Image: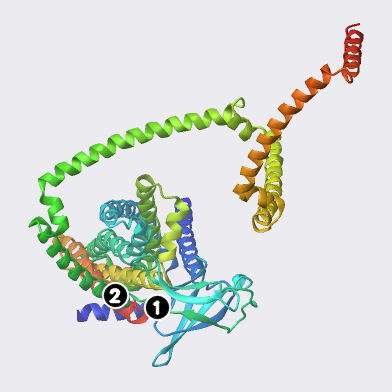
Amino acid sequence: MGELSYFTSRFLKEAFKRPFEFKELLKQCYNMGNRSLLLVGITGFIIGLVLTLQTRPTLTEFGAVSWMPSMVGISIVREIGPIITALVCAGRIGSGIGAELGSMRVTEQIDAMEVSGTNPFKYLVVTRVLAVTLMLPLLVILGDAIALFGSYLVEHVKGNVSFMLFFNQVFDSLEFGDIVPATVKSFFFGLAIGIVGCFKGYYCKKGTAGVGKAANSAVVFTSLLLFVIDFIAVFVTDIFYDL
Amino acid sequence: MKHSNAQKLRLGTFVIISTIIFIIAVYLIGQRQNMFNKTFTISAYFQNVNGLQKGNNVRYSGIDIGTVKDITMINDSTIKVDMNIQEKIIAHIKKNGIATIGSDGLVGNMIVNIVPGKGHSEMISNGDVIESYSKIGADDILSTLSVSSENAAILTADLLKITNAMTEGKGTLGVLLNDTIMAKELRQSVTNLKTASYGATKSITDLNDIIYSLKTNDNTVLGMLINDSISGKKLKSIVNNLESSSVEIEKAVGNINTIVDDFNSSEGAFNYIVKDSSLVNNLKSTLKNINEGTDKFNQNMEALKHNFLTRGYFRKLERQEKKEANNKKD
């Protein structure tokens, strides 16, 4: 934990120090953002469909099926969208970073960079962590939108609800207390994925087994950390927004 | 290089689309909370806000027109609710509007409903205070329900007693339920009633036919009276004449009565003739004497015809009569 805290503070120091590795940052943004789009989109769409299909019979039983858009909107924007997207990204990006940096450490590429005078932390860690921190909120927004569209499709087919009515009800039920904390939370999710992935890879033990272990522990630890951050975020939101 | 540029383009597109979606979402949420509209503030005082919160909707005649801006406790029984209202609605809300706190559906959020007041009033302006009306809260409803349920329990207990008594055959209703003879008689009565109703129905049908034929057939007196307006007018005039005649007849009868009374009461000749029985006897004897007198007179006349002094005169009269008779024949 102590090492991770030190690693995080070092990232924060290095992130605002010149020179900035913009090219590498953009490359990482593309790798982490655009290449995760399909995965996040499919996951979000299925989550929207399944959530609506599962909830619909219960709401119908209570005669509250007209509350479906509000319920789905709040649950996706507040919680399900950010956490599912973050978990998917933890699996894809976190493990990727852990494995990539781990193999670089094992093959002594990081040591070589240090010897050649390049700051490997700035080039490898800061760019990756920044990229995932910036990309995850955008992925969450797109994931939310696709999940809501999936929910709308079910409502349209089952309940003949129009597009306008569905999204009117969704935005009627949403408040800034839902969308702002969810977006802020997503930044922290991204930061956690990046920091843990980089930390596990950067300090990978020698040997090929270490790479696999680094990738695996990056995903496991990130997933756990995501729920901890989520709990803290909800707790803080509850204080400020009085949910 | 080309590969890098395509990547940048894709990345840019992704970032822009995500940002636009986020901005649209923020705008739509903000618009619903009147963050981008010009608003004005009005207030209302309530005794109980029933869980109303900042940000809850304000509705005017069922349309969302604003949100609750602030809720302040003024004293132990007064709560001030400030509301942000869209400026474009200002023309429609009058100063006599009434604010009530209600619920958006059975389990929905609390809302402030503003309903238009009765009569004409001035347009509302920024900072105005409108009247409020506290609806019955859920607690009041529950307490009323509690009293109702107690009453219902008493009623059901009484009902149970009644039904027990009825099943045991006590009281009129019990006898009605348990007495089989009465049931048979009732059944018979119902059968009779049924028969009577059939008969009544038939009679009514016949009566309807008769009435219909009377209405439609102008040849009958009633049909003519009903359908012929000219005959109706005539009949009306006849009735009027009859009415006036009856008045005249009544007058005449009155006069006759008066005359008769006068006759009866006075001592005139008529009264004497009518009432005096001795006069009748006298008259009878007189008439008898007259008859006898005329017989004797006839005998005298016959004697005169044969007397030589007057015989010539009578023959002359006979000749004249014969002559007139011959003239008539010619």
SS state under label 2: helix
Q: In this image, A102 relative to A137: left or right?
A: left
Which chain's residue wears label 1?
B
Q: Quadrant of residue A92?
A: bottom left
Q: Is residue B116 above or below residue B251?
A: below
Q: Which residue is mark 2?
A: B144
Q: Amino acid at mark 2?
A: Thr
Callout 1: helix, strand or loop?
loop
Which residue was labeled with disc 1? B52
Give the quadrant of residue B195.
Answer: top left
Q: Residue furthest top?
A: B330
Q: Distance between the Cα atoms at labels 2 and 1?
A: 23 Å
Instruction: Tell me the chain of label 2.
Output: B
- In primary-sequence order, the first of circles 2 and 1 is 1
Residue A17 vs residue B134, the one in the foreground: B134
Q: Nearer the viewer, residue B14 or B277?
A: B277
Q: Is residue A75 visible?
A: yes
Tell me the residue at 61%/78% (across/down).
B124
| Same chain shared by disc 2 and disc 1 | yes
Residue B185's tag is none
Q: Residue at x 12, y 64 (%)?
A: B161
Q: List x then y, in percent, for residue A218.
A: 21, 66
**Apparent side of residue A66 relative to residue B187 in the rendered image (left or right):** right
Dot 1 crowding, Cα within 10 Å, few <14, some 14–19, many 20+:
some
Q: Judge whether residue B250 can be spotted in this image.
A: no
Q: Nearer the viewer, residue B194 or B56?
A: B194
